[in-house]
Image (tube, rainbow, N blue to C red):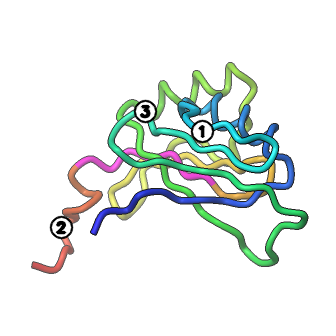
Amino acid sequence: MNLNQVTIPSIHVEKATAFYQTLGLQLIVDALPRYVRFKCPNGDSTFSIHKVDSLPNGQGISLYFEEEHIDEYVNSLKQKGIIFSSDPEDKSWLWREAHLYDLDGNHIILYKAGNNRKNPPWRIH
């Protein structure tokens, strides 16, 4: 089995589209104002956004995007006006993470995990 895509809800798909393009995702399906789909810059995964009249209640969705050069990437996004809730920092689970939120309140974690993404020292063998 292979994960094809993740789809998130948005009240303003047009604004969300511009936000995720700023993060570096490449628009591959444009069915505005109701739906868009992106190709991630690396790998085969895709990401889509669909129009909703109201957002779900609760904590919402967390999206993880891995970036090899996390500190430089975060600095470049800040220069483009992206606001972060936390700068890159090393975590106890051996990932380096920076946190932000999209326009609909979805939590985005930009991270660098390297081999620890799938093979942390505590992995079950």
Would you name the residue on which mark 3 appears?
41
Magenta part, dominant SS: strand
Alpha carbon distance from label 3 to label 2: 28 Å
Alpha carbon distance from label 2 to label 1: 39 Å
- Depth check, front residue: 48 or 125: 48
Look at the picture and state if 71 lies above or below 115.
above
Tell me the kind of residue under disc 2.
Pro
Provide residue 65's location: percent of width, then percent of height.
47, 47
Provide residue 59's location: percent of width, then percent of height.
72, 73
Q: Which structural element holds mark 3?
A: loop
Would you name the residue on which mark 2 appears?
121
Provide residue 76's location: percent of width, then percent of height.
58, 21
Q: Which structural element holds mark 2?
A: loop
Magenta part of the protein: which range? 108-114
Q: Quadrant of the C terminus?
A: bottom left
Left-right relation of 114 to 71: left
3 within the magenta span: no
Label 2 Cα neighbours within 10 Å, binned few <14 / some 14-19 / many ≥20: few
Q: Quadrant of the N terminus?
A: bottom left
